Image (cartoon, rainbow, N blue to C red):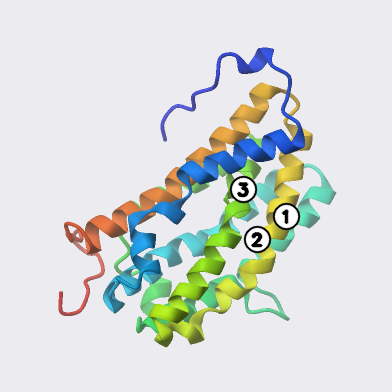
């Protein structure tokens, strides 16, 4: 990732209020969140083929599969048992437990609904190299930066509920054959806002200076870049110019 620029004036300014910090974070989302990416716009307009949706579901699975790993890294770095108890919920949300199948299994159901072979999806067969690089960089962020920045990088959840609601509506409208695979999104409608509230409060309470707040804001920018880069790779490989690299998933009949 690029070097994280910090406003040189920030150390001399007082820290933002909770509302001010939330506004700055939301401004990042308005500018950089992947709801505006051309690939998502095509999806919401019903302009993706089944094969393009398969490529999306396959590559997005790699991201979904590392989320509990990412959260386990953050969990292991938390010195406070209250923090660890709260963060542990995220791992269960994706891995499941005795009472819940978890988000990873729900995403596999979505992939299956597109017509993909679940075993091949789980094995990562055909995932784009750029997807792996982008997703692995997310793991690097939570390993190598401060705990504050690692937590802040999760704050795309501040914006995800609106995108999930829109996505569910548009998928049902334009791709009704996917309707049986949307359980993942249903669950995230409640999970994401809960997680975002906790993470935002943590960042506000632990970023004691404006400079630390700027680091948190930059971590969110970097996470948005990671999400955007994944869609860039999909668009290049399967939309325009449509050049999947060697070993990548190939759309049948393309």
Q: What residue is shown at x 64% (from left), y 22% (from top)?
A: 211
Residues under numbered marks 2 and 3 in contact, where contact means CB atoms less than 8 Å apart: no
Q: Is residue 55 left or right of residue 1?
A: left
Name the residue carrying label 2. Answer: 192
Task: Give me the disc on residue 129.
Answer: none
Please give the label number shown on residue 87: 1
Q: Which image quadrant for residue 128?
A: bottom left
Image spot of residue 170 (x, y percent): 45, 73
**Which is more foreground, mark 3 or mark 1?**
3
- The residue that appears at 57% across and 50% down in the rendered structure is 156
Q: In the figure, residue 125 lies in which quadrant? A: bottom left
Kindly check if marks 3 and 1 are in contact, taking CB atoms under 8 A apart as contact.
no
Q: Secondary structure at mark 2?
A: helix
Mark carried by residue 155: 3
Horizontal side of residue 246 vs 169, given as left or right: left
x and y, in percent, of residue 88 in the image: 73, 59
Which residue is located at x 16 percent, y 57 percent?
241
Is there any visible trace of residue 197 in the rendered image? Answer: yes
Mark 1–mark 2 Cα distance, whole angstroms, equals 13 Å
Q: Nearer the viewer, mark 1 or mark 2?
A: 2
CA–CA distance in space, label 3 to label 1:
13 Å
Kindly state the secondary structure of the residue where label 1 is placed.
Answer: helix
Q: Position of residue 201 (x, y in %)?
A: 76, 43
Q: Label 3: state its secondary structure.
A: helix
Residue nearest the viewer, comparing 251 with 37: 37
Instruction: State which tag comes first along the sequence, 3 or 1.
Output: 1
Q: CA distance from mark 2 to mark 3?
A: 9 Å
> In the rendering, at what x and y percent does residue 71 appear?
63, 54
Residue 118 visible somewhere in the drawing: no
Q: Earlier in the sequence, mark 1 or mark 2?
A: 1
Question: What is the quadrant of the C terminus in the image?
Answer: bottom left
Sort mark 1 into few (<14), some (14-19) or many (20+) by Cα contacts within 10 Å. Answer: many
């Amino acid at each position: 990732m690029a070097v994280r620029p910090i406003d040189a004036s920030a150390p001399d300014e007082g820290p933002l209020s909770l509302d001010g910090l939330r506004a700055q974070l939301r401004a990042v989302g308005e500018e950089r969140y992947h709801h505006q990416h051309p690939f998502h716009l095509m999806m919401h307009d019903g302009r993706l083929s089944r094969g393009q949706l398969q490529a999306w579901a396959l590559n997005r699975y790699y991201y979904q599969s590392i989320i509990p790993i990412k959260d386990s890294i953050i969990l292991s770095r938390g010195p406070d048992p209250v923090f660890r108890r709260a963060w542990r919920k995220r791992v269960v949300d994706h891995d499941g437990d005795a009472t819940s199948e978890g988000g990873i299994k729900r995403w596999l159901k979505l992939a299956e609904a597109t017509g993909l072979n679940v075993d091949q999806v789980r094995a990562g067969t055909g995932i784009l190299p750029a997807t792996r690089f982008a997703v692995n960089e997310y793991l690097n962020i939570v390993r190598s930066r401060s705990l504050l920045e690692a937590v802040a990088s999760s704050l795309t959840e501040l914006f995800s509920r609106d995108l999930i609601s829109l996505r569910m509506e548009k998928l049902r409208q334009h791709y009704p054959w996917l309707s049986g695979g949307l359980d993942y999104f249903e669950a995230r409608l409640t999970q994401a806002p809960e997680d975002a509230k906790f993470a935002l409060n943590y960042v506000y309470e632990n970023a004691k200076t404006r400079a630390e707040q700027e680091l948190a804001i930059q971590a969110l920018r970097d996470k948005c870049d990671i999400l955007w880069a994944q869609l860039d790779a999909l668009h290049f490989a399967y939309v325009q110019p449509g050049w999947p690299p060697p070993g990548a998933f190939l759309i049948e009949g393309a």
